[in-house]
Amino acid sequence: MALLLRAGVDPSTADVEGTTPLYAACVQGNADVARRLLEAGAPPDAESAGLGAEGTPLCAAACWGHIDAVRTLLAHGADPDLREDHGTGLTPLEWATAGTHPETVAVLRAAGAH
């Protein structure tokens, strides 16, 4: 990934199915990769459109309780109240609550999530 970013590849370029690298990093809980993508210009709230990989990076990280990825996204300006599915889906807080991730819920609430 570092080589691609140094070569000037757009960090928000989705794969053929529409999954963004930031979304994939957040689903996997890879906060370091997420941070690198964000620092390279990946938008923190861009929705992924991949089949089975749709939604916002923050919703993905919150759903799986990947607290370091959640913190990284919030530190880079992710909206803690942004609903996925273009505003019609769940919020990160709703995902964290449904997934029974109390630490993630606390971090999102501290960031102003409702």
Image (cartoon, rainbow, N blue to C red):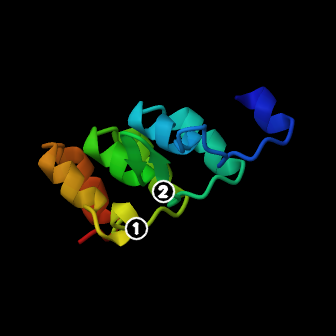
Identify the residue position indicated by label 2 in the image. Answer: 47
Q: In the displayed structure, does residue 32 sit left or right of residue 28?
A: right
Q: Quadrant of residue 100?
A: top left
Q: CA distance from mark 1 to mark 2?
A: 8 Å
Outermost residue on the right side: it is 7
In the image, residue 88 lies at what x, y percent?
Answer: 29, 69
Q: Quadrant of residue 52?
A: top left
| Image mark for residue 86 | 1
Residue lying at 15% horizontally and 52% vertically, measured from the top left = 97
What element does badge 1 sit on? helix
In the image, residue 59 lies at what x, y percent?
Answer: 34, 52
Q: Amino acid at mark 1?
A: His
Question: The N terminus appears in which quarter of the rendering?
Answer: top right
Q: In the displayed structure, does residue 1 sit left or right of residue 6?
A: left
In the image, residue 20 lies at what x, y percent?
Answer: 56, 44
Question: The C terminus appears in which quarter of the rendering?
Answer: bottom left
Contact, CB < 8 Å: mark 1 with mark 2?
yes
Q: Is residue 42 above or below residue 101?
A: below
Residue lying at 57% horizontally and 39% vertically, measured from the top left = 21
